Image (tube, helix red, strand yellow):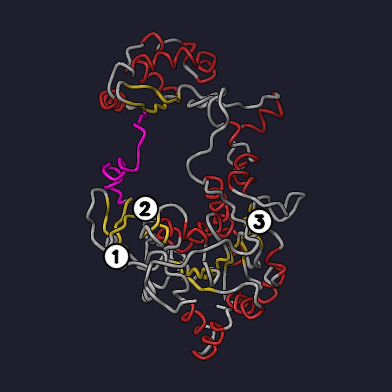
Amino acid sequence: MSKSSTSFTSSEPSRSPDSVATSDPSDPSDPSDPSGMGGNPGTAGTPGAASSQNSAATAGLPARGALAGVKVLELGTLIAGPFAARMLGEFGAEVIKIEDPQHGDPLRKWRKLHPDAGGTSLWWAVQARNKKSVTINLKSPEGQEIVRKLAAQADIVVENFRPGLLERFGLGYEQLSALNPGLVMVRLSGYGQTGPYRDRPGFGAIAESMGGLRHITGYPDLPPPRIGISIGDSIAALHGVIGAMMALHHRNANGGRGQVVDVALYEAVFNLMESVVPEYSVAGMVRERTGASLPGIVPSNTYPCADGMIVVGGNSDPIFKRLMHAIGRADLAEDPGLAHNDGRVPRTQEIDDAIGNWTRERPIEEALDVLQGADVPASRIYTVADMFKDPQFIARQMIQRHTFPDGTPIDLPNVTPKLSETPGQTQWLGPELGAHTDEVLARLGYDAEQIEALRENGVI
């Protein structure tokens, strides 16, 4: 595809061959070598937006992240695989992202684009930050050989294709680990690498349904809604990162070899389902939808105010007592039958009514002032606009300003979690399609003539 560039635009993409999106529209970046960046640091210009110059380097902290020296090869598209690789890159790993030469990752065209006509997704700026984009046709033998060479030098391969696809390309774990016994391969798919469903297409929405999340979300008299983000994909990605770190530790500290980290999206969701399995096993209880409340933990709910809604979590025993005194219900605060959660659960409606009757007579700010004064956890329900001006977001620099090559400012979420000695950072924004192809191939020993021949033959 194109040679190295710093533009943030790309051509219209389509799905990769047999790719499992693991979502529904539901690198290390070497700090000393910022060539091919998709964007450059700028200065803060909006409330709550910290300058990207407030990085580890300018704060006197190490510029290299906790994962400096770790090499990651990303063979994924859209959300689950790319989010896992993104987190590794945010903490200093070198992430080489393989993309289809003609169209790239389909996420480049998801949601709001910049510029509006023919541009690239604004989401791309964060989902692909700190990654090196290398275009390779995985269907071509020459492209497969390049991937094998990259995998031979990698610590981690992250992929989210449908099970069996990489094996057909000669790029499965058995083939790659024969070249690199220390390789850790993170494999994210809808149903995992085994079992009767392994060959089915898998999306985050399906995982949320099968893993149990959708059934318990929403109100009992309405169909189960979806959460407004692709939570199933992101939960799976986090499990992939955790698994990769454990596998690397085993390899490095225990003298082990590499291994496969097999993450099924539905299992990642299932892993967060708290007590539903033992409750069904022992008591035959099937948890159902309960609206905005947290079932079996009282009180924890959304309550109406005169000008909106707030969330209150008064479910620990001492907090419950303080909450009841704060709303003028000393009778409930001192009721021995409500001293512990198991006594409060049968009286959930009574307690919720007491809180709701108090909140609906007050505007949000007044209610929050009283509750926070009583040391009761409570919050308004934030929009993204609220986040930009909130003093907590500002104090912790959770929104960071960068600049596109055309001079347009863009604010991104800062890196999470915060490490005190080796904090993560944004070295560059999501790059142009193929921005690092020449650089990476040259490192593998390809000369300029060979690279040009690969390009002319549609391999890169």
In this view, 184 is above or below 370: below
Q: Is residue 185 left or right of residue 198?
A: left
- Which residue matches tag 2? 413
Badge 2 amino acid: Pro
Q: Estimate the spatial distance between the alpha carbons at disc 1 and disc 3, rounded to whole Å.
A: 37 Å
Q: Nearer the viewer, mark 3 or mark 2?
A: 2
- Which residue matches tag 1? 41
Q: In this orientation, which residue lies closer to the viewer: 31 or 23?
A: 23
- Which residue matches tag 3? 262
The x and y percentages for residue 224 are: 57, 32
- Looking at the rendered structure, the secondary structure element under dot 1 is strand
- Looking at the rendered structure, the secondary structure element under dot 2 is strand
In this view, 319 is above or below 451: above
Q: In this orientation, which residue lies closer to the viewer: 355 or 207?
A: 207
Badge 1 amino acid: Pro
Name which of mark 2 and mark 1 comes first in the sequence: 1
Name which of mark 3 and mark 2 comes first in the sequence: 3
Over which residues does the magenta segment extend? 377-397
Q: Estimate the spatial distance between the alpha carbons at disc 3 and disc 2, rounded to whole Å.
A: 28 Å
Q: Estimate the spatial distance between the alpha carbons at disc 2 and disc 1, rounded to whole Å.
A: 14 Å
